[in-house]
Each structure stands twice: as C-alpha cells, then as structure tokens.
Image (cartoon, helix red, strand yellow):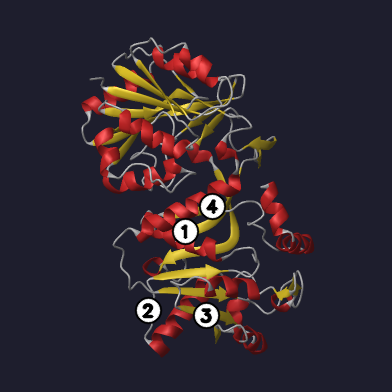
Amino acid sequence: MPKVSVYTPTYNCAKYIQQSIDSVLKQTYQDFELLIIDDASTDNTSKIIKKYEKNPKIKIFRNKRNLGLNETARKAIDLTRGEYIIRVDADDYMDENALMLMAGILDKHPEIGMVYPDFFIVNEDGHIINYFRKMKVGEEVELLDLPAMGGCTLIRKSCYEAIGGYRPDVRWQEKYDLWLKFIEKFRPHNINLPLFYYRRHGNNMSENTKKLLEARRYIKENFIKGKKIKKSRKILAIIPTRSKFYVYPDFPTKKIAGKPVMFYPIQAIKEVPDIKKAVFATEDADLAKEAEKYGIKTLLRPKELASPGVGIENTVNYVLSSLKEKEKYVPDIVVVLFITSPLINSEHIKEAINTLLAYNADSVVAVREDRKFHHKHGKYGLEPVVQQRLLRHEKDFLFEESGSLIVTKREFITKNNIFGKKISHIVLSDDEAVYIDNKFQFWLAEQIIKNKKIINKLA
C-alpha cells in the first residue's frame, strides 16, 4: 500500500497536465500512487494522459460526463489507498522534494493532521511572477482565518474522513469549507519553503472574485448551522448617524437611487433574522422621526457624541448603557453599521456574524483587499512599505477598512475601544466597498445600485 496518494482532477488542461504529472513522478519520495481523473475533457487531455497508462504508479479514470471539480475530487479520494492524500491540480506542479518534506512532518508528528508549504505563482508559460509566503502557524499567527492553499496540502486521510470530506453541495471554494471543518478538530502545520507552483491564467476558477466571495458566505453560513452554538445569543444592531455631513448637509435623507441613504442599512438589518433588536442612534429628533418610518427603534444621543473626532465607541457604550438601564437588555454580539456605505446588505451582515462564530474571533471588520504597492515618506522621500516586490508575505497583506460594518462581542467593548484582540474580517468586492466621503463616491454608489445586474456580469 502506498504511503501517499496524489490525486489530480483534470478538465481541458491539455496545455499543462504533462508538467503536472511529471512533477509528481520526479519526486525524491517515491512511496506514492497517482490517480488521474479526467472529468470528460473535450480537448487533447485524454490523449496526453494515455501516455502514462502503463506506469505502475499511475491509475487513470475518466468520467462519462462532466461532474465538476468538487465531485471529481470526491470520487478520486474514494479511490485512494494511501495514509496521506494530496491534491495537485492539472495546471499546477510540485517541487521535487515536496512529498519528502511534507510526509516527513506527518510521519514524525502524529498530532499534526495537515501540512502545507509556501508556493510560487507562475504565469501561463511557467515563469515565476510572485512568491507567496504563509505565516507560521502557532508562531506568527494564532487566528487561523486565512486558509491554506487548496493544492499541495498533505492531509491524513483519517482526518479528511473524520470531518466528512468535501461537501457535495459546494462547487466553489471547497478548500475553504474543508479548512473550516479541519481546524475545528485538528492541528495544521506549514513549511516556509516554496514547494509548489500555482499557475495563474485566464481560466482559473479562483479569478472570479464575486463567485468566490459568495461561495465563502454560503460555506460559513452552513458551517454555523451545523454547530451547536448557543441559540439564545442576543444580537444588537446599531446605526450611529449624525444629522450633518460635509458631503451633503441632508445626507441621511438625501435620495440615492430613489431611496434615502439611511434606508439601505435599516433595510439590511431588517433582513437578518438573527437580529432581534436594532437602534438608530442620532442627536437629531427630526432625523429620529424619519428613521422610525422604516420600523426601527431610535435613540437620541447627546450632541457631543455626534461631533467629528469623537470615537464611535462612545456612542456604542451610550446605547448599551441606555438599553441596560431602561430595558434590562444586554446583548452578546453588537453589529455597528454605517450609512456612509449603502451597498452593505444583509448577506454581508450575516457573513460577519458567522465569521465571528466560526473562528471564535473577538471582532470582525469589513475590508477590501488592497493589492497595490504602497509607499511611506522617509528620509529621502518615498520608501516602499514592502521592500521586495516579488515576495508576498502573508503578514504584509494590506486590507483597507471599508468603513461600513463592525461586528464585535459585547464583552470586548470598552470605553476606549470596540475591538477585541482577535480580529477577523470579511472581504468585500470593489463595488460593495464604496464609502461615501465625497460627491463622486455618492454618484458612484448610485450608479452601482442602479446597474447592479450589469456590474455582477462584469465582476
């Protein structure tokens, strides 16, 4: 019986699959089998695979119809015989020492259930365009909310089976689903060596940001549904709103795509079933009356709390104190939503709550990934924040706070802060993360709301 089972699901990957297969066969560690499943390819893939059919280490299968990556991967794993399993996609390939180093970790450390390396990103022609370094589990990172790369992750088959494997209803981001279930029960480990080559090209499923984010939201929601999490948790939503904004004096009531700006966050909250109590906090009595038309409880806060430069934690604490004193109400989780981000919807709120619970985080913030190169002013003018452009270190990733949504456990709210120590995040796409602080952003938000169907097709 082989120690390691490598499996390669493939569909129309004739251009790359030979390099992928050869990278497995050239491993310095030879105690493996390779299972290749052709998911009913219509290009030259089957002809290339056929060249390897006499190799005793290789088993070749072909689906009669296209089943998709997830189902094909499930089928492949069912056929594996090894103690450890690893997926190598047909457009990716491994360093020759990958199996030796990773299998060695699992052999020596029975408490570890999964091991994964750093990796190179290559283009269609195989030229390295970036080096991706993951943070060291247990040393550099404790909150494991950044999943391992799906490919080239060696996992004990017994662990895979214990967590139920790939879910049949998840067709996108199946590795994310597996990661959530794995870290709940087992310990991951990573090697800070680039042992894997991830190919980026126009046909990568992961390039569709919109579908990727939607898939993660679905996965988190179903993960939480399956857990015995306290049903009686109380979730409070707060919309802190000033009556005056410098963008437009009447900003909260100004129409955007036919509705007042403040309508959008109120409506988003009403569409989240788990939120039983919501408060619109403002210093303006007339504005409070307008908000009540949309069926939300209002609370007049002191005018000084609405002054520019006064932290939002002051309003949050004022609302919490008022509800405790007047209604004996003390929430477990607090959601803070801002009217300056009208594109935040109920799905984002639910995802933030689910993220808080799934990772047992203290707080969650909505962010947008910032992939640009940044500079700061130094002795001789501008200096790059990240010195090496080729090296992408996970700890150097930049996330821009969207200014739209914060979810936090009430126990971590203090008079000076509303964030706990363990802060997770949800990622918004560019069209979801619009923050209105000028008239152009107002115009942009309106165009996005009016043309949502067109924008979704472009994403």
Type of amino acid under label 4: Glu
The mark nearer the N terminus, 2 or 1, is: 2
- What residue is pinned by disc 2? 330
Q: Badge 4, how many Cα within 10 Å: few under 14, some, many 20+?
A: some
How far across and how far down the image is residue 1, in percent? 22, 20
Numbered tag placed on residue 214 in the rendering: 4
- The residue furthest front is 64
Q: CA distance from mark 3 to mark 1?
A: 20 Å
Which type of secondary structure does the marked residue at label 3 adopt?
strand
Q: Report how far apart the C-alphas of labels 4 and 3 lie in the structure.
A: 28 Å
As helix, strand or loop, the secondary structure at mark 2 comes to loop
Q: Amino acid at mark 3?
A: Val
Q: Confirm whether residue 154 shows in the render.
A: no
Q: Which residue is mark 3?
A: 279
Amino acid found under the numbered disc labelled 2: Val
Q: Is residue 160 left or right of residue 302?
A: left
Q: Position of residue 316 (x, y in %)?
A: 49, 74
Rendering quarter of residue 384 = top right
Q: Is residue 396 above or below residue 25?
A: below
**Mark earlier in primary sequence (1, 4):** 4
User: Which of the two discs, 4 and 3, sits closer to the camera?
Assistant: 4
Tag 3 and tag 2, C-beta contact below 8 Å: no
Circle number at residue 252: none
Mark 3 or 2, nearer chain start: 3
Name which of mark 4 and mark 2 comes first in the sequence: 4
Gap between marks 3 and 2, in whole Å?
Answer: 13 Å
Q: Is residue 25 above or below residue 259?
A: above
In the picture, residue 366 is in which quadrant? bottom right
Using the rendered view, name the quadrant where residue 162 is placed: top left
Query: Which tag, 4 or 3, sits closer to the chain's start?
Result: 4
Answer left or right for 383 relative to 444.
left
